[in-house]
Image (tube, rainbow, N blue to C red):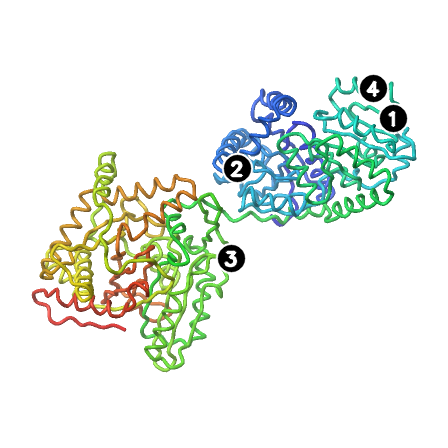
Amino acid sequence: MTSPPRRLLLLSATIGEGHNATARAVEEAARRAWPGCEVSWLDVLEQMGSWVPASFNWIYAANVESTPWLYDWFYRALWRWRWFADGSRRFVGSWSGRRLRRRIAEHRPDLIVSTYPLGTAGLDWLRRRGELDVPLAAVVSDFCPHPFWVYSRIDAHFVMSEVSLRELHRAEPEAVGEVCAPPVVAAFRPADRTAARSRFGLPEQGVTVLVSCGSLGFGSVERAVDASLAVEGVGRVVVVCARNEALHQRCARRAERDRRLVPLGWTDDMPALIAAADVVVSNAGGATALEALACGRTLVMFEPIAGHGRANAELMAEAGLAELCPRSSDLTGLLRTLTTDPAELPRRERTALEHSRIADFTEQVAALARLRRQPATETMRAQDAFFVHATTPRTPQQAGAVLRLDGGTRSTQEWREHLRELVQHRAPGLPLLTRRMVSRGHRRPRWRHVEALDPAEHVRCRELHSGTPREWHQSRHAFFGTPVRADGPPWELLLLRDARTNRTELLAKAHHALGDGVAITSALLRLLTDDETRAPEQPADRPRARRPRAGVLLRGLAHLASAGFAPSTGIDGRSTAGRAFAWREVPAADVRARARAHGTSTTAVLLAVVAEALHHLLDDRTGTTPGRRFRIMVPRTARLRDGVGVDEPGNHTRTLVIDLPIGPMHPAQRVTEVAERMARAEEGEQPAAAGAVLAALGLLPAPVHRWAVRHVYHRRFFGAVISVLPGRRRPVRIGGARLTTVFPVLSLAEGVGLAVGVLSWGDAAGFGVTTDSALLPDAAAFADRLLHAFDALEAPALGEPSLRGW
């Protein structure tokens, strides 16, 4: 919204008068800022049900007056137990949101402002369901915004001070907040004290104390009167009993005995009454307190009511805007100081006025015409949050790739401009690339959509000076060895180019929470390729999983449980932040030919290649014995099973845990055994069970989920991560250059020293090796072993394979 709203809808509630008083301030400011704007009100409690207003007012009064311990418990529980706060907010949000839906549609507002927590909850509920496209704002009339006040889908929250803003973010880290001037009508402003006193027949001299405890007049009102009258320097004590008729009668009887006491019932002239006072005593920290600050009067919070009243008082005292007096003796002592020290009252009045002038409330309301909707957020799926929780300084969870380009004619500067232009124009349409991770402490992390990307933050280009293998090696290692930035959408590109030979490579990395290899590949293709080509669907040799039924899951869970812990691998131990990388390639046709010759899938052949390489590595180190096994984790895409396309962000995988045979045997026999073990793992419904476990972990509170992930994604259960990713055969061009080979880059788990990814692209199958440099220092040597192992899988009608690497 960039023009003044034609229709403003205010959501308030008559539970006391504080919320309505704030709404009147918003209406007054709106009419000044936008002449001709139609302002409508909805009482949220009335919309929630005909019986609700009376019931809620009775419950509120009963809790404050009769069972304050119960109200205190509820209020503390909102802060102490996030699950309790979230559940309570979802319940009332659903209730009020459903009841408000039709009435909001009838009003057709351009802007909605809520001054009541349950109204704000309903707006958040509707926004989560995509039903409200208009800007939403909340004006928090409590000095301390508790969890019922604050929601991530509301575009702006106005709070009373910087310390209030701190509490707002403690209640909801994703909430957007702004400090505003006290939201009171313009009549509450500094005024002549003498003239105001004359209106009420109060003496010009002496200190006047105003005791006002809200429209319901409950709490320790009479004790406040007693403590005030105990001070000789107090000339008059004016007590506003509001709608509490019994209190008014008791105070009237006492006034007959002490003329210093002036009892009043309901009054519509609170601005003049506050102007007449020197000290305002209250107990809830709501509208009365804000009105006193706006008038520049000394504010005292006496025996605050339970729950929000006590929280408001403590926060106002912390901000230096009120004096907290929890006992009668404290109030009496404070008033003695104020009546005997002539400098104290003026000092406190200056502090109150300085706060009330931090902004112009009318201008802040006028700025709502330019209020922008907050970027959409969504809770991470458990499978994506898994990789957030698995991330540590020693084990960053990021997937990447090296894209080798051939035939390009662009200079380094031209490449930079081309890639940044692609990011600027294409990336906003790719959901995977516009997501930023939002950490929420004890709750599951969320995704926040970023509307505008800065290409410079995601694309860098480097021109190599010498072009030596060492310089290429160091550039790749520096890029992949550094965790991806997490202060924005977590993905980066680096173009490397040798100006002398025109050799060009594009390096890409992304946080694993963004998606699996299929999703990230698809997003990169749509971002970079000249024809915005999509990634391929799953390869033909990948079996489609059956729908997981209870029996299937039980079999899978039993299979996983029977596997036990992984045997020691010889390349495991405590993880370090050091990484080593290596990349090799073989002809893709040779991979397919070997699979046909052995009568199995390409995945089984490639896993057998890894098993053969591990056999030789460990045989050289400690020797291997017949029957020795090495447990690996194999992520398998489940997008077909889940009915999810390749462009859908997120991780849609199922996991196989396979014990590779690494003892002495003929390579052909190793292929056969690997294929059989893969088949048994599939038949045992491991993938379905692993997916169910991941989903179940996501139901746990975030700290428990994090603990569980870091104990499951660990060397005690597997010794290496091996992934065979789908590729494509048709040629693809990026900036006019042909994409010839793609080398995947995988991340490691805690204590796991090896990860190998394989991806077939065009005529080549690229191997990407990642190792923990402390556990397996020479990644290049292991990559060479992979080539020799592949060469050992001789197949009929095959000549010597062409082996290349760096």
Residue 326 placement (x, y as % from top left): 70, 33
Q: Which residue is mark 2?
A: 80
| Quarter assignment of residue 140 | top right
Measured Cα–Cα span from mark 2 to mark 3: 36 Å
Q: Are marks 2 and 3 in contact (CB under 8 Å)?
A: no
Q: Nearer the viewer, residue 315 or 524?
A: 315
Q: Are marks 1 and 2 in contact (CB under 8 Å)?
A: no
Residue positioned 54% across, 28% down in the render: 99
Q: Nearer the viewer, residue 24 or 212?
A: 212
Q: Which residue is mark 4?
A: 254
Task: Specify which label sits upstream in the sequence, 4 or 1.
Answer: 4
Q: Which residue is mark 3?
A: 452
669 over 312 or under it: above or below: below
Task: Specify which label sits upstream in the sequence, 2 or 3.
Answer: 2
Task: Specify which label sits upstream in the sequence, 4 or 3.
Answer: 4
Type of amino acid under label 3: Ala
Measured Cα–Cα span from mark 4 to mark 1: 10 Å
Task: Specify which label sits upstream in the sequence, 3 or 1.
Answer: 1
> Which secondary structure lies at badge 2?
helix
